[in-house]
Amino acid sequence: METVVVNRPFETDLEAMVSFCRTMKSREAWPGAVPSYARGSNLVYNVGLRLSAAAMTDIEIDEKLDEVTQSADGSAVFHSTQRVTWPDGHADATTEYLFRPGTDGGPNTLQFTYSYEPPSTKLVKTKALPEFRTGMEKVAGIYLKGLSKVVLVS
């Protein structure tokens, strides 16, 4: 598994951010995301994969959210599993959303961890895998930036 970790401060109430990140609306912050449907703890959405290191394709993500765990220090975390399907195959991925309260009046922080199976050579040529990973880190950063903006406006 490949893993990218991105951190982003946010000013919104921590519990409100946790709740928002468990909604289909939050997935619209992924670049190129188009919601499909939500049912219980499952979110299904499509994303237009447009990274320079990968073949352009549309993927479908079927995501199952785990329960939120609260810690005594005020932090909260939840995980999800994803089944990612594209025209020539599928892969599995996991996420972790870790929300930490700010200290000394500072902003709260969201740490997003995305672990994914390396894509097939039909999607990404072997020599382009490092560039693909860099692209995934950039996209995850854009996602978190979008989450913080949407929640601030909501």
Image: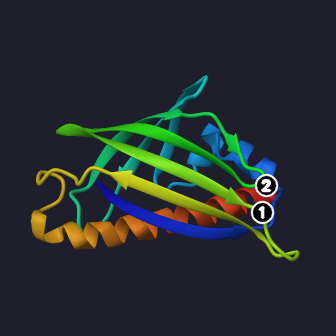
Distance Cα–Cα, label 2 vs label 1: 6 Å
- Quarter of the view holding residue 41: top right
Q: Nearer the viewer, residue 16 or 98?
A: 98
Earlier in the chain: of badge 2 and badge 1, it is: 2
Amino acid type, mark 1: Pro
| Vertical position of residue 101 compared to residue 154: above or below | below
Say if 58 sits above or below 134 in the image.
above
| Residue closer to the observer: 128 or 33 | 128
Q: Is residue 75 visible?
A: yes
Which residue is at a point 11% across and 70% down the rendered structure image?
Answer: 127
Color scheme of the displayed model? rainbow
Q: Residues within 10 Å of mark 1 (few under 14, many from 20)?
A: many
Residue positioned 38% across, 50% down in the render? 48
User: Where does the image place residue 125, in percent across and percent down from the top left?
Assistant: 12, 62
Query: Residue 144: where, in percent of width, then height?
Result: 59, 62
Quick one: SS at disc 2?
Answer: loop
Q: Is residue 70 left or right of residue 38?
A: right
| Residue depicted at 21% across the width and 57% down the height | 55
Q: Is residue 70 left or right of residue 118?
A: right
Q: Tell me: residue 128, above or below residue 15.
A: below
**Residue 52 in view in this figure:** no
Residue carrying label 1: 101
> As drawn, which residue projects farthest toward the top?
39
Amino acid marked by disc 2: Gly
Label 1: element kind: loop
Q: Residue at x 77, y 63 (%)?
A: 101
In this rendering, position of residue 145 left or right of residue 113: right
- Residue 54 in the image: state x and y as whole percent: 23, 61
Q: Are marks 2 and 1 in contact (CB under 8 Å)?
A: yes
Residue labelled with disc 2? 74
Quadrant into which the N terminus falls: bottom left
Q: From what the image shows, is residue 83 above or below residue 57?
A: above
